[in-house]
Amino acid sequence: MRAAIALGRLAALSAVSATASANRNDNGTDHAAKQLLQESMNWMDMYYDTEAGYLYNLDSKALLHDTRSSAWYSAGLLARNEGDDVEQASKIVENIIAGQHRNVSSQWYGDYQIYPEEPTVGTPQYPPVIYNSWDPNWRGFVGTTFILMLEEFPDLIPHDTQLRILESLHNATVGDSYRVGGVDSDNLYPSYSNPAIMRAFMSGWVGRRLNDSNMTTAGEAYAKDIVTLFDRADTLSEFNSGTYAGVSLYALTLWAKYLPQSSLMGQHGSIMIEKTWEKLGQLYNANLKNVAGPWDRSYGYDMNRYLSILALQIWTLVGKVEAPINAKPYTMGHKNDFAIGPLVAILAPFHNTLVPNNTLSALHTFPGTHTVSTSAFSPPWDTYPRNITAWISQNLTIGAESFSEKVIGGPAKNPSSFNPAVVQWSRKDGSVGWLTLYAQVEELQAVAGDSTLELEYPKGNKSSTFTFLVGTNSKTGKRDVASWSDVEGVQIGVNGTVDPMYSVAFAGYVGGAGETINDFEFWNFTYGMPVGSGETPRVKLSFNLQ
Ligand SMILES: *[C@@H]1O[C@H](CO)[C@@H](O)[C@H](O)[C@H]1NC(C)=O
Ligand SMILES: *[C@@H]1O[C@H](CO)[C@@H](O)[C@H](O)[C@H]1NC(C)=O
Ligand SMILES: *[C@@H]1O[C@H](CO)[C@@H](O)[C@H](O)[C@H]1NC(C)=O
Ligand SMILES: *[C@@H]1O[C@H](CO)[C@@H](O)[C@H](O)[C@H]1NC(C)=O
Ligand SMILES: *[C@@H]1O[C@H](CO)[C@@H](O)[C@H](O)[C@H]1NC(C)=O
Ligand SMILES: *[C@@H]1O[C@H](CO)[C@@H](O)[C@H](O)[C@H]1NC(C)=O
Ligand SMILES: *[C@@H]1O[C@H](CO)[C@@H](O)[C@H](O)[C@H]1NC(C)=O
Ligand SMILES: *[C@@H]1O[C@H](CO)[C@@H](O)[C@H](O)[C@H]1NC(C)=O
Ligand SMILES: *[C@@H]1O[C@H](CO)[C@@H](O)[C@H](O)[C@H]1NC(C)=O
Ligand SMILES: *[C@@H]1O[C@H](CO)[C@@H](O)[C@H](O)[C@H]1NC(C)=O
Ligand SMILES: *[C@@H]1O[C@H](CO)[C@@H](O)[C@H](O)[C@H]1NC(C)=O
């Protein structure tokens, strides 16, 4: 293991951006960002295979390696710049570029391998399966990391490596231009916020750098669609998500920091970051250390127990202790995202100056009971914008969205990550209880009110069911749950057109009736309709803290 040492380079960076933005950039922020860099790098050091010049797979897949986390690690090596860090960084970058897909006619042209040991994508034995044997978003994840490295550490990268990076970026940008939502199983629309923002940025940046005006123009045109969608209600289409709001904020920071004012992205990046944080701040509850629902795409139900990229950003803003992050981040659900820590840390001194003061204050201290009302729009999936309501009180938060979509499970068609109605509460031991509606319909009317959650399936019928996933009790609470009265910390009342008899099942780590979702165990409360009912399926939950 490398020793944990002071991070001179990052300190120098902070100083630069502090003068550049002449804004709040307090010592606390710098200290926290350094700590994030240090801790995420110390963790990744354990996975680094010096001989291969790649990180081992973070899930320990029998000594296989991993491309994307290696790229993130290499940026961290430049930021840390100790011992032979710089040399290793170039070695990793050269390896990643050597493995880049080169067939101009293939849909995955210019994309980066998932892992260096993989068979050739597109052979009969290894068919191209989007988001499996190749991941179109990795052009953006790896490509933007390369750009960040060129921007922040040009003097640490040998000239010939820089040229290869530019060639690699050119190919990745051309390949990314093959992506058209709805064609060839691709789903990149401007409403798929996180990769869309990365795409526009790469095209704009690489076009300018290589004097390829087509590329520059394409990036600006895509950015215009993203900005127009955003300006409708000052919200990202991929509205609220511990993981992907974090990626979108990362990518918007690249817009704001690395593109000139002559670019739409340079003009709009900062304000979009500010507006995004404004909503996040309103939805955040510092007592629970969670952003209230609804969550368009979430990889967990309690930010204290799964690692979200947003939590890493919050770490740099309020410090690790106050952030929704475990003392040992690599023990949390979805822990592999800790590998993006270096990028968040490197950008923090700039990004953090754009976080509104109200938000910063809300990240520290809950400001008092309030409601949030807004909307988000994801064409072509949404028939109408999704209407979002949230009621946020000291120890209980309720957030929900109404929608009418063409698919079940949100634009990603994934009921495991689409959480349109969510309730969280704090329990006596300080842990967080949660309840989420499992997504089963294309249309939902959902309204969060004072201690209530109202749900309706406008197109439902007598075979509809409402399934609520409910988190397990605290360590000292009841292990067994057979009814609502066994759920710790809150009394839950249910009323509606549903059959009042409900079933309760357990989805556990090694047993029960079903599988865990996103590593979370849960109790499954399911309501059906009375036999022969002709009523619209409707249910109203009310909550009283115990
Ligand atoms: C600034 O941060 C350093 C650690 O990087 C710490 O030693 C110092 O006390 C901090 N100063 C203030 C004024 O917070
Ligand atoms: C390149 O990709 C095209 C389209 O998938 C394919 O027909 C062709 O055989 C590939 N060429 C090589 C050299 O693999
Ligand atoms: C970029 O793509 C071209 C084909 O257009 C290929 O010849 C070249 O090797 C690629 N470069 C890299 C760095 O992958
Ligand atoms: C792009 O144009 C600028 C200004 O004309 C020039 O300095 C630079 O070398 C060019 N870059 C490339 C990659 O052609
Ligand atoms: C730019 O686009 C125009 C029109 O589509 C095309 O004719 C031209 O070859 C392109 N230039 C480059 C450098 O790709
Ligand atoms: C926060 O408040 C300070 C002091 O009033 C002010 O200088 C700064 O511009 C504000 N920052 C933001 C992002 O609003
Ligand atoms: C919220 O929880 C805290 C800690 O248990 C407690 O001190 C406080 O009274 C609670 N507030 C309300 C409104 O229930
Ligand atoms: C959201 O509210 C607007 C205005 O009340 C309404 O026109 C729209 O249909 C609503 N959207 C959904 C999905 O219910
Ligand atoms: C009830 O709705 C489901 C799901 O939309 C549908 O498959 C089923 O045919 C409907 N049943 C009746 C009796 O309309
Ligand atoms: C629902 O609430 C209404 C009004 O409070 C009440 O009349 C009705 O009996 C309740 N229904 C159920 C199923 O509890
Ligand atoms: C919840 O329980 C119901 C009824 O047993 C079952 O049909 C459904 O598949 C379960 N859902 C999940 C997400 O486990």
Image (tube, rainbow, N blue to C red):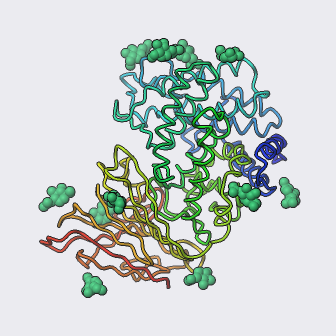
x and y percentages locating residue 114 in the rendered image: 52, 33
Residue 439 spot, x, y in % from top left? 34, 59
Q: In which quarter of the image is residue 19?
A: top right
Identify which residue, 531 or 352, lies in the foreground. 352
Above or below residue 540? Residue 464 is above
Q: Position of residue 176 (x, y in %)?
A: 48, 28
Q: Is residue 439 visible?
A: no
Specify the farthest residue to the left.
Answer: 532
Task: Name the residue nearer the viewer: 167 or 525.
Answer: 167
Q: In this view, does 118 lie above or below 509?
A: above
Foreground: 301 or 390? 390
For residue 367, side relative to residue 298 (left or right): right
Q: Quadrant of the N terminus?
A: top right
Q: How many marks?
A: 0
In the rendered structure, the answer to whether residue 413 lies left or right of residue 159 reads left
Residue under the point 83% across and 44% down: 15
| Residue 102 appears in view | yes
Residue beneath the point at 83% across and 41% down? 12
Would residue 51 be found to the left or right of residue 400 on screen?
Answer: right
Instruction: Kindly identify the residue that appears in the image at 51 percent across and 18 percent down.
Output: 102
Q: Where's residue 402, x and y in %?
A: 36, 61
